[in-house]
Amino acid sequence: MRHLLAVPVLLGLQAGQLVAGGGFVDDVWTQEQLEAATRRIQADVERLRGAKFLRPVEVRITDHAGFLAHVRARVEKVIPEGMIERDQTMARMLALVPPDMDVWAETLALLRESVGGFYDPGADTFYLMESFTGKVAEIILSHELTHALDDQLFGIDAPLAERVRNADASSAFSAVVEGSGTALMGLWTMQHIGQLTPEELAAAGDLGAGAMAEAPPYLWKPMLASYLQGQRFLNRGYRTFRRQEKTYLDVVAHAFASPPLSTEQVLHPEKFWDSEQRDDPRPLVHRLDALPPGWDLVGSTVLGELLLALVVEDEGARAPLDLSDPMAVSSMVFTNDAAAGWDGDEAVLLACDAARVLHVATLWDDAAEAAAFRAALEARRPALTASAAALDLEGVGSGLRFAAPLAPDAVTFSLFHGLSATDLSALLATLALRDAAGG
């Protein structure tokens, strides 16, 4: 869930680079111990980031029930009604998850196994899961208190709200948020690594790794990208800003004030930080004012390079990954050649009774990149059509259809179930599409 700001504890990715293992500490901190640790870590965060907290941060100890209550409250606050169902339907149709998977339930189960603490921007409050104490808890604090500092200095919820209907832009902003927390957490951990016991390192080593390895990459890979690639994105900016005698805080401030517009810019930071290579997405607009009677728009979004890379990922890349292996984590890639030429897209989900059509228009850097994506998508046809057939409960009709492209650098396709090929053609004939930037 890109809007929950929960750390899945990247300890498995930071301290886990030193030792792999598992288990929780036995004791539970008191509120007084948590507050004392918070004061120490806040001072460290201020020193490492070069900025002061503007107001106190409330800290609390919670359990799984408290975490789930927080999730429900955050969903009600930041996620528009119907968006969870929309995203689940799209994920099923794109064969990113099994056609019968309850994506929301699986997401919650994954988070329950991988969350060590979370910061609530709306309440200016940090929650530590009761299972964590000692230096492991302090590492979590260094990450989450960085969220609190960034929230006080720059704001988190308002930018998220502005992007919530655009999955790609939302993920790009989340990479700034999580990359900032991960960068400072890494610094803090390295400065205190000698104080961690082998047991504490082991407790951090593979938290949530088993649950992630068993879940479809769609549920965890974008989340990990926000941490790992987000940090790389900010580090690339720092290399540029450092030549101008600016600080890491300047980089973070710039990224919050003018965030990356797409996951493409996060995955390829030079397309954001280098003015000569800057590559902003081209917006696409579907005109839906002439839909046939009975058809409605369920929702629309931008998928972006990160999600489209998952869509066309070959079977070898979908094999289970040992996330407790630091080498496997550090070498993880979040895109592929077929998706790397992305330049813009819009996906619209349409419904009429039990029928569903996911119509996706994409733009690419050139005709060759478009052809590469289409070929990769064609290679996924068996999986995509199998998923569509499974979703077509009444056997009316289902499949994958490519449309005439908007231009040589475009690929447009539809995934559908619950309607005949003839009815699909009639529906698609009513859709108007244009490149909003190019006319």
Image (cartoon, grey):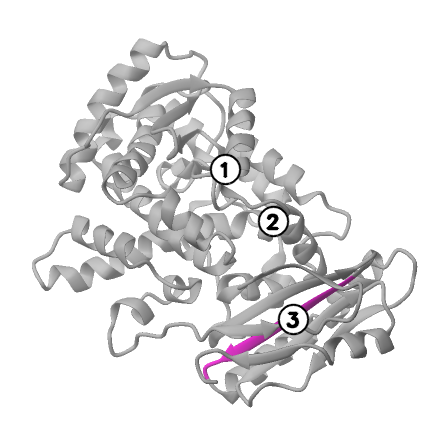
Q: What is the crowding at mark 2: few (fewer than 14 residues within 10 Å), some, or many (at least 20)?
A: some
State whether residue 417 is above or below residue 182.
Answer: below
Q: Which residue is mark 3?
A: 288
Quote the CA–CA distance across marks 2 and 1. Answer: 12 Å
| Residue 351 x %, y % | 75, 60
In the foreground, 162 or 340? 162
Pointers 3 and 1 in contact (C-beta within 8 Å): no
Say which amino acid is labelled 3: Leu
Q: Which residue is mark 1?
A: 77
Image label count: 3
Pointers 2 and 3 in contact (C-beta within 8 Å): no
* Local secondary structure at mark 2: helix
Q: Is residue 65 left or right of residue 175?
A: right
| Residue 118 x %, y % | 42, 31
Q: Residue at x 15, y 61 (%)?
A: 241
Quote the CA–CA distance across marks 3 and 1. Answer: 28 Å
In the foreground, 165 or 26? 165
Say which amino acid is labelled 1: Lys
* Local secondary structure at mark 1: helix
Q: Residue at x 36, y 26 (%)?
A: 125
Q: What is the crowding at mark 1: few (fewer than 14 residues within 10 Å), some, or many (at least 20)?
A: few
Q: Residue at x 54, y 25 (%)?
A: 69
- Any mark on residue 285, and which? none
Give the extent of the magenta segment.
Answer: 356-365
- Any mark on residue 83, and which? 2
- Residue 215 found in image quarter: top right
Work out whether mark 2 precedes mark 3 in sequence or the reverse, and give the earlier one: 2
Say which amino acid is labelled 2: Met
Q: Is residue 154 visible?
A: yes
Considering the whole magenta stretch, tell me its main secondary structure. strand
State whether residue 358 is above or below residue 247.
Answer: below
Q: Is residue 237 left or right of residue 267?
A: left
